[in-house]
Image (spheres, coloured by chain):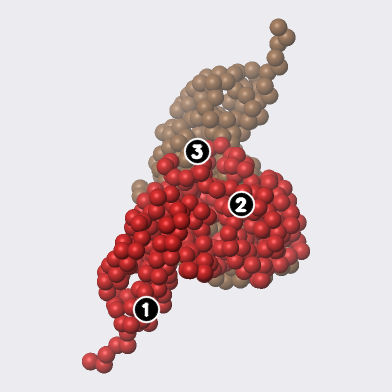
Chain colours: A brown, B red
Amino acid sequence: MKVITTIHELQSNIESLKKSVTTIGFVPTMGYLHEGHLTLAKEARDHNEVVVMSIFVNPLQFGPNEDFDRYPRDVERDTALARNAGVDILFIPNTDDVYRGKQSVTMSVKERVDVLCGRKREGHFDGVVTVLTKLFHLVQPTRAYFGQKDAQQVAVVDGLVKDYFFPIKIVRVPTVREEDGLAKSSRNVYLSQQERREAPILYQSLKKARESIMGGEQDPSVIMRNICDMIQEHTSGKIDYVELYSYPELYELNRLEGEIIIAVAVQFKQARLIDNIIISVEPEEKLNV
Amino acid sequence: MKVITTIHELQSNIESLKKSVTTIGFVPTMGYLHEGHLTLAKEARDHNEVVVMSIFVNPLQFGPNEDFDRYPRDVERDTALARNAGVDILFIPNTDDVYRGKQSVTMSVKERVDVLCGRKREGHFDGVVTVLTKLFHLVQPTRAYFGQKDAQQVAVVDGLVKDYFFPIKIVRVPTVREEDGLAKSSRNVYLSQQERREAPILYQSLKKARESIMGGEQDPSVIMRNICDMIQEHTSGKIDYVELYSYPELYELNRLEGEIIIAVAVQFKQARLIDNIIISVEPEEKLNV
């Protein structure tokens, strides 16, 4: 595995790679790798000749009151994990190389953004699409891998790639979970022991919602209310949102039909956890009148 | 020469081309081709295995009071000219294919824009970088060719490509002129006979400015004043601007040094003409104190 820390070196490596390989899989991360990231890397490994992973804690996607400085970093451990996962190139650029002075052109996300996490994180997805556009041009991947855990991010990236015709396939990889169902996250380390015991309730409430939909429930507000009740009753966390939309468009639904996402965010003392499931709801057969 | 009218067909052509060729030259145009465009095509032809030209009158770069509907179009003639110029693929998409519903991510130009033509064409360059980003991803060129005549456009595109690390070289090609010095433009057809006789004054005033700088003039305001006087005296047009900046940054200068651009825009009855020269001014030798 090659570790590359400058854009210039990455560019010349990719340029020469392009002459001999036809598929590059790309896994963009902010580091502090967990099994979720490594699952993305393994997916990339299975379907591409070359696997590139980036580690870049992107300041532009953190708000002024968010945890940019506190975001966990461990490059040495990440390097070992990436190597074991079969990554060929690990790209760890520094901020000044990625953002060279004032941007002369900015990007702004207008759709799929004023819902879920985007509503409270103004400008967050602007930062995401900005850095991804840079990284996509640098790595020139055939496929880029994203975890479903950040389902809104996948939806926004889907919009970016479709709007601008990036020659890249976006692959959405199912959320990796602890044995008790808790979605893996770099932020789980901030949970207290008590909170850690409560946290699996998020996924349990989503699974229960799925069962209830499969059992015939069609009213989004009933589904969301039941999830809220369950989380409030069994955790000390404060519900940030429980929402239900079409996916990946993220439109509100009056009635459950098609691809839908149910997503939750819960604020614990030192960590805000998110989780979601995406369900395909068969349209009801039309009655013959 | 292949004429392609859908994005889908272009994508599959480029994908298969990428397997056998290593250089693609790209000439984006709004059609109604003149010698300026053909010079770009010839440059592209000389340095690349494949030449792609696009013809797309991009609605997003026209303001509400600009000449989108009136912009001249002649696809049949353009096709013959492109073929003669050695273009391999002529891409003529329609608007609904390039803009598929509401954009979920928008782009906005923040630098190099509140000067020259950009000052009076709010949003114009946002439209330019949006469509170019789409076209760059579709064509995946090695080199893209732009005329120096639209020097601000070249500066903005230079900023776009540098900010986002597009793997594309931007080639700036000198302005092509009529025998009397008038810069070629699709809009020249709107000049009256009298205006057409006056129009070469624009370039003459720029050449005179260059002479004066070479002769030792160092004050930007004197240079600009002389150009204004000359244009006002010898044409019926109304000066829109006469400006002088560093290039390609487009910063104001107190003193002539480095790469500079002098640019003019003059409004005639039915046509607004622009022209510019870029001059390299050697820094004065420092006196030994």
Return the residue found at the far top.
A289
Where does label 2 land, which residue?
B55
> Is disc 3 in the same subunit as disc 2?
no
Question: Do the numbered discs 3 and 2 sit on residues whose CB atoms are within 8 Å?
Answer: no
Of circles 3 and 1, which is in front? 1
Residue B165 percent across, percent down from the top left: 53, 62
**Residue B90 quadrant:** bottom right
Element under disc 2: strand
Question: Do the numbered discs 2 and 1 sit on residues whose CB atoms are within 8 Å?
Answer: no
**Quadrant of image for the C terminus of chain A:** top right
Residue located at (33% from left, 82% from top): B215
Q: CA distance from mark 2 to mark 1?
A: 38 Å
Which is nearer the N-term, disc 2 or disc 1? 2
Labelled disc at residue B211: 1
Q: Residues within 10 Å of mark 2 (few under 14, many from 20)?
A: many
**Residue A142 quadrant:** bottom right
Given residues B183 and A24, the one toward you in this image is B183
Is residue A111 at least partly visible in the picture? yes
The answer to whether A179 is drawn above or below residue B1 in the figure is above
Residue A96 percent across, percent down from the top left: 44, 65
Is residue B168 at least partly visible in the picture? no
The answer to whether B29 is drawn above or below residue B98 in the figure is below
Q: CA distance from mark 3 to mark 1?
A: 53 Å
